[in-house]
Image: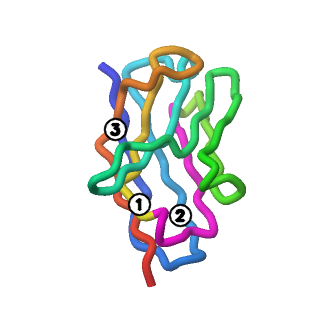
Amino acid sequence: QVQLVESGGGLVQPGGSLRLSCAASGSIMSLYAMGWYRQTPGKERELVAAITSAGSIVYADSVKGRFAISRDNAKKMVYLQMDSLKPEDTAVYYCSRGSTGRGNFNYWGQGTQVTVSS
């Protein structure tokens, strides 16, 4: 059974930083793509960043240069470093695992709230 547990969300002022963590269990994480998505009320869940099993990374245009995704396969952890946060980054952030090394995300954590506000 795949389990993904996010942590690290919270309230931060504009321009601040947060680091989200995702602990994965129930599978050999190194074989699969991992990603971070976010969702706000009334909107579809959107991809923020993803990293393949080979280490290739993609980012949403809105976070390029501000966010960084990384993975530690030995620890079964995925991270999202978020810098220069903006109010529009406010959302519930979800960790996700793909069913392949390149994507096809269909496993989800419970989400962690990130609020950027002064």
Question: How busy is the neighbourhood of tag 3: few (under 14 within 10 Å), some, or many (20 plus)?
Answer: some
50, above or below 38, in the image? above
Q: Under tag 1, what secondary structure?
A: loop
Q: Position of residue 22 (x, y in %)?
A: 45, 42
User: Do residues under tags 3 and 1 come within 8 Å of each other at their CB atoms?
Assistant: no
68, above or below 47, in the image? below
Residue at horizontal 53%, vertical 63%? 18
Residue at horizontal 49%, vertical 53%? 20
Which numbered tag is attached to residue 109? 3
* Residue that carries the numbered disc 2 in the rendered image: 18
Question: Tag 2: residue type?
Answer: Leu
* Residue that carries the numbered disc 1 in the rendered image: 9
The segment highlighted magenta reads 76-89
Question: How busy is the neighbourhood of tag 2: few (under 14 within 10 Å), some, or many (20 plus)?
Answer: some
Q: How many marks?
A: 3
Question: Tag 3: residue type?
Answer: Gly
Q: Does 31 sit left or right of 88 as displayed?
A: right
